[in-house]
Amino acid sequence: MPEFEAVGAVRDFVETGGDVLLLIAFVTFVMWTLLIERFWYFRTGHRQEAQRVRELWQARDDHSSWNAHQIRRMLVSEVRQKLERGLGMIRTIVAVCPMLGLLGTVTGMIEVFDVMAIAGSGNTRGMAGGVSKATLPTMAGMVAALSGMLFSVQLDRFSREASEHVADVLEIVHE
């Protein structure tokens, strides 16, 4: 029954770290859902969009006028917007994760102070539980933020390079 042991370990981890860990887990799940969706878009949707834009541009007779320049800028901007969709939300979640960890730290320290106020500083077992509730959410928030930051930086780079590539493909003819 290894799967039951894993569930028990997760339950113990959440009990030790407090309810803030559930919030961090939910926010991390949302972040990773957005990250996976963006990677999926880069693998599938962007290729179709780049092809569509390339075909629209090649179907035009005029590639040199002021209007053509503006249409090219619009097409590249549309591609860039689709590439960057959701990246702002991912960056926001990455920034929020450490703050949620800090929230867990504060609630854990409040528990330590409550134990100290009720039982005095001699109750080390009660204080240790509060210290666990203070440190585990901090670690969880930092791990979530670091993982999201690593992949969001990669997505930013992909987005920038892909939009530059589309801009390079849509050639302007200088007369």
Image (cartoon, rainbow, N blue to C red):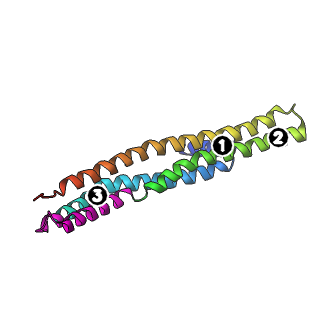
Res 80 quadrant in image: bottom left
Q: Residue at x 70, y 40 (%)?
A: 134
Q: Position of residue 121 (x, y in %)?
A: 87, 32
Mark 2 nearby-residue class (10 Å; few <14, some 14–19, many ≥20): some
- Mark toward the viewer: 1 or 2: 2
Region in magenta: 56-84
Looking at the image, residue 50 lies above or below residue 115: below
Helix, strand or loop: magenta stretch? helix
In 3D space, how far apart are the residues under numbered discs 3 and 1 (Cα atoms)?
A: 42 Å
Instruction: Give the label on residue 113, or none.
Output: 2
In 3D space, how far apart are the residues under numbered discs 1 and 2 (Cα atoms)?
A: 23 Å
Please state, as top left, top right, bottom left or bottom right, where the C terminus lies in the image. Answer: bottom left
Q: Does residue 5 appear anywhere in the picture?
A: no
Q: Is residue 106 left or right of residue 150?
A: right
In 3D space, how far apart are the residues under numbered discs 3 and 2 (Cα atoms)?
A: 53 Å
Q: Which of 3 and 32 lies nearest the eye of the viewer?
A: 32
The kind of residue on which mark 1 rests is: Asp
> Element type at marker 1?
helix
> Element type at marker 2?
helix
Residue at the spot of label 1: 12
- Mark toward the viewer: 3 or 1: 3
Q: Which of 7 and 160 lies nearest the eye of the viewer?
A: 160
Q: Is residue 87 left or right of residue 100?
A: left
Mark 1 or 2, nearer chain start: 1
Q: Does residue 33 appear anywhere in the picture?
A: yes
Residue at the spot of label 3: 46
Q: Residue at x 34, y 61 (%)?
A: 82
The kind of residue on which mark 2 rests is: Phe
Mark 3 or 1, nearer chain start: 1
Please state, as top left, top right, bottom left or bottom right, where the N terminus lies in the image. Answer: top right
